[in-house]
Image (cartoon, grey):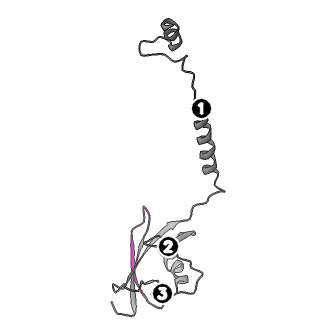
Amino acid sequence: MTSSSISVLVSTFHPFPTLSFSLPKTTPTSKLPSILNPVLALPDQSLSTSNGKSIDINTKGTLSSLLSQDAQAGFLLFRLVPKVLGGKGGFGSQLRAAGGRMSSQKTQNNDSCRDLSGRRLSTIKEAQK
């Protein structure tokens, strides 16, 4: 590897393998989707760095700008994840509502339940009185 190129590792998701290729340091980050599309053919994809920082492909940065100051290794590690369509957070609000209902049920009437011998708990309570 020469000093003008960077080894790029792209960790993907199942069933795709991890991709490895070498690119010039001056490659714009906006070119990364067009480089990955012929290999993976994913219409909606999201790239992030290994520490979870999302890569904005609309910025005018290069691959060399993504290298950390102390990184002398000359390689970049990306994580590719598919974009998942979602709504307005309905599932979270459903969980919140269900949690409120569950915590408000402080007293439960278990009289109609049966014990291990098959007797109703209400008859056992009456017999104990």
SS at mark 2? loop
Say which amino acid is labelled 3: Ser
Determine crowd level at label 3: few under 14, some 14-19, many 20+ residues with C-alpha closer than 10 A. Answer: few
Q: Label 1 near label 3: C-beta < 8 Å?
A: no
- The residue pinned by badge 3 equals 65
Determine crowd level at label 2: few under 14, some 14-19, many 20+ residues with C-alpha closer than 10 A. Answer: few
Residue 30, relative to residue 81: is it above or below? below
Determine crowd level at label 1: few under 14, some 14-19, many 20+ residues with C-alpha closer than 10 A. Answer: few
* Residue 72 occupies quadrant: bottom left
Residue 56 spot, x, y in % from top left:
56, 77
Q: CA distance from mark 3 to mark 1?
A: 56 Å
Residue 94, relative to residue 82: is it above or below? above
- Magenta-drawn segment: 12-23
Q: Residue at x 63, y 55 (%)?
A: 89
**Along the polypeptide, which appears first: circle 1 or circle 2?**
2
| Of marks 3 and 1, the one in the foreground | 1
Residue 13 magenta-highlighted: yes
The label shown at residue 53 is 2
- The residue pinned by badge 1 equals 105
